[in-house]
Amino acid sequence: MEKESYLERYTEYLKNTKKMAENSYNAYRRDVSEFQKYLSDAGVDRPEDITNTDIVSYILSLRKSGRAPSTVNRKIASVRSYCSFLCEEGVLDDNPAREIKVPHMEHRELEYLTVEEVERILSAPDQSVKGIRDRSILEIMYGTGIRVTEITSLHMSDVNFRIGFITCSGEYGKARIIPLGRPCRRALERYVDEARPKLLESYRKRQRAFQTESAGAEAEPDYLFMNYHGQKLTRQGLWKIVRTYADKAGIQGKLTPQILRNSFAAHMVQNGADLKSIQELMGYEDAAAAQIYLSVSRNRIKEVYDRTHPRA
């Protein structure tokens, strides 16, 4: 079988079996494609001929190329995943990547906002249709800590206003239920009642303008968040919303959706949330991933100690 065919089957495996989000399996696909090219240049054209030496040599070439440690680690993880897949398919008798470990990385200092900065951002949208929509998006980002892709993929049926929670499919297809705080719930209810119908009407007008007599009726979009054309809000659109209101709120530095996500977790930890709960709410597969937020708790304890102990 051609190596391209293995790559296609591997991509389908990540998508359908591992239930990875599109951005994730596309990143793995790019990494494995790069690995395949390296092997081909080295004269290894068949996946069944991959050896541990080939993988070690590839990792050394990545490090010599000046790639960031985080990028190298991600590519190592992709190669390990690909080799595991080849073993499951019976292409490889033994996994040549079994002994390859992803080096431990020192975590960078966690970036998050203060509660006062978050309040300024949440207060920045106006009372227009766009402002009502954007306020609800910002509220759900900070109020639930879910990922950008998860937000843009939310459907109307994922929101339970009566009980007050959303159902999020998650990065690996494992659904999790996340409570909605009162401010977030109010903002979402206002958006659904006042702003979303107007965005949906924009979609209907466009449909009527382009509809022909032979065209069949198209089901209306069920996505929770829409753009001005009544279509699904994109990742790029959401990033733009965050940057716009960060500027309006006078937040210094480059604000990203991840920093808002960090703020959700950091503020919960500061108020006593345990890491197991943080892991479940944020959809981490590995509990170790949530440990970065321990630094927030440690910093707060030190601040309290410095402020209150006579011999601090």
Image (tube, rainbow, N blue to C red):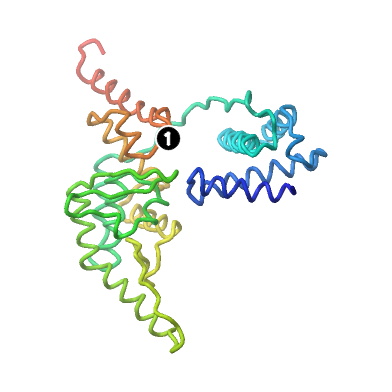
Q: Residue furthest top?
A: 311
Q: Nearer the viewer, residue 24 or 135?
A: 24
Q: How many marks?
A: 1
Crowding at mark 1 (Cα within 10 Å: few <14, some 14-19, many 20+):
few
Secondary structure, mark 1, is: loop
Q: Residue furthest right?
A: 43
- Rendering coords of residue 136 (x, y %): 27, 57
In this figure, which residue is indicated by the disc labeled 1? 285
Q: At 29% from the left edge and 60% from the top edge, which residue is drawn?
A: 156
Q: Nearer the viewer, residue 284 or 191?
A: 284
Q: Residue furthest bottom?
A: 213
Q: At 48% from the left edge and 46% from the top edge, which residue is drawn?
A: 19
- Rendering coords of residue 135 (x, y %): 27, 57
> Compared to 6, does 188 lie above or below?
below
Q: Is residue 37 found left or right of 192 in the rendered image?
A: right
Instruction: Give residue 272's quadrant in the image.
Output: top left
> Compared to 170, does 220 lie above or below?
below
Instruction: Give residue 158's quadrant in the image.
Output: bottom left
Q: Is residue 198 found left or right of 75 in the rendered image?
A: left
Q: Work out which quarter of the rendered image holds the C terminus and state it.
A: top left
- Rendering coords of residue 311 (x, y %): 24, 10
Q: Is residue 85 found left or right of 128 in the rendered image?
A: right
- Rendering coords of residue 174 (x, y %): 39, 43
Instruction: Give residue 203's quadrant in the image.
Output: bottom left
At label 1, the amino acid type is Glu
